[in-house]
Image (spheres, grey):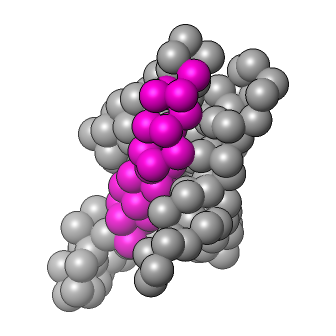
Amino acid sequence: MFAKTQDEVRRIYDSVDTIKRLSDRIIGIGPINIIGLDGILAWVPIPGLGTAYSVLAGAFILYQGLRARCDSTTLAAAFLALLVDAGVSLGDTVIPIIGSTVDTFFQGHLYAAHMIQKDIDKTLYIEGSASQAHRDGSHQDNVGEMRATKGKKRLVYLG
């Protein structure tokens, strides 16, 4: 389940980016892309379709965050943004016009994806295990590399 290589982490980052763009960045108004598949499905007259997409896309983003070993605080915040997004999508069915309008412009997938991607960006991923790094003395070197690399605040061993 967890990513084992830095290449897998990069693919996770890219897949979260794809869902972010698909969900909340397809249609632009002026220079800003603000409407995505999530908002478009809010207006489709098939009950539950938008909510199903919202929940599945959100679950995918969270799963990818887990695979990348994101911080639990980040995952909790992303979960809350996605929970609100799913609630807004559910509002399409309860209050059609108002719910659909809010769902069109609320970008929960975008917020959650940004959180996951930011967490990945601030993490230095090391292939190998923490126990091996402690045994061979490379852990201190890895900590030093993390501190020396701009923007890195976490160290995660992938092995």
State left or right for residue 82 relative to residue 92: left
Tell me which residue sits at (55%, 58%) in the image: 35
Tell me which residue sits at (64%, 66%) in the image: 26
Residue 122's place in the image compared with 51, above or below, is below
Outermost front residue: 97
Q: Nearer the viewer, residue 18 or 53?
A: 53
| Residue 83 picture quarter | top left
Q: Nearer the viewer, residue 97 or 127?
A: 97
Q: Nearer the viewer, residue 99 or 143?
A: 99
- Would you say residue 103 sits in the magenta stretch? yes
Outermost top residue: 94
Horizontal and vertical percent position of residue 46: 80, 25
Tell me which residue sits at (62%, 45%) in the image: 38
Horizontal and vertical percent position of residue 134: 35, 62
**Majority secondary structure of magenta residues:** helix
Q: Nearer the viewer, residue 143 or 7?
A: 7
Residue 31's place in the image compared with 47, above or below, is below
Horizontal and vertical percent position of residue 30: 46, 80
Image quarter where the N terminus lies is top right
For the magenta stretch, what is the residue range?
96-121
Image quarter where the C terminus lies is bottom right
Residue 119 visible in the shown view: yes
Residue 149's place in the image compared with 21, above or below, is below
- Would you say residue 35 sits in the magenta stretch? no
